[in-house]
Amino acid sequence: MPVYKKPQPGRFTPVHPVEKHFHDHDETWIIMGGKCKAFMVARDGGKEEFILEEGDIWMVEAGVEHGCEILTEECLIFPFPGTIPEGSHQPGHYYMEKEGYMPTLQVAKAPLDRYKGGN
């Protein structure tokens, strides 16, 4: 389980925003400075836009296209991945137009007998 000590954010600007992309894993953004207009394209294709600013945290579900337009001189974003399922791309930006699929995560429930007998 990762621990981030003194996380170093990415620096994004109006000239270099976060382009529309997706991941095979969930991703969480911590906004450490500045302000942006974020967007996400839901699984049904509907697009939502909203403002993120310093102190905000945004969790993006695997397979949801997302990105942002920078509204201040720069926006400091520390993104970190959730669990990376077997068979996933390595963390990075991927594009549905190129990849041709939309990932969906599913839980597999493995039986256990660790707590049988009241222990």
Image (cartoon, rainbow, N blue to C red):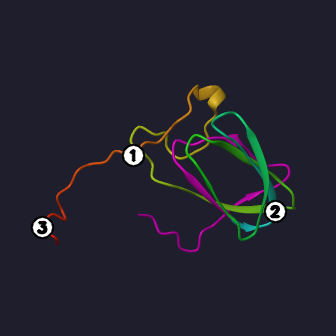
Give the number of the disc on residue 107: 1
Q: Is residue 92 visible?
A: yes
Taking the image as shown, residue 52 lies to the left or right of residue 83, namely: right
Q: Determine whether the residue tagged by mark 1 lies in a helix, strand or loop.
A: loop
Query: Which amino acid, by three-letter code, is at mark 1?
Result: Val
Q: Where does label 2 land, which residue?
A: 35
What residue is drawn where x is 26% and y is 48%?
110
The answer to which of marks 3 and 1 sits earlier in the sequence is 1
Check if mark 3's residue and mark 2's residue have beta carbons within 8 Å: no
Q: Where does the N terminus fall, quadrant-wise?
A: bottom left
Q: Is residue 20 above or below residue 27?
A: above
Q: Where does label 3 land, which residue?
A: 117
Tell me which corner region of the image, top left, top right, bottom left or bottom right, holds residue 29. Answer: bottom right
Q: Observer-nearest residue: 102 or 93?
A: 102
Q: Is residue 17 visible?
A: no
**Residue range (magenta):** 1-30
Give the number of the disc on residue 9: none
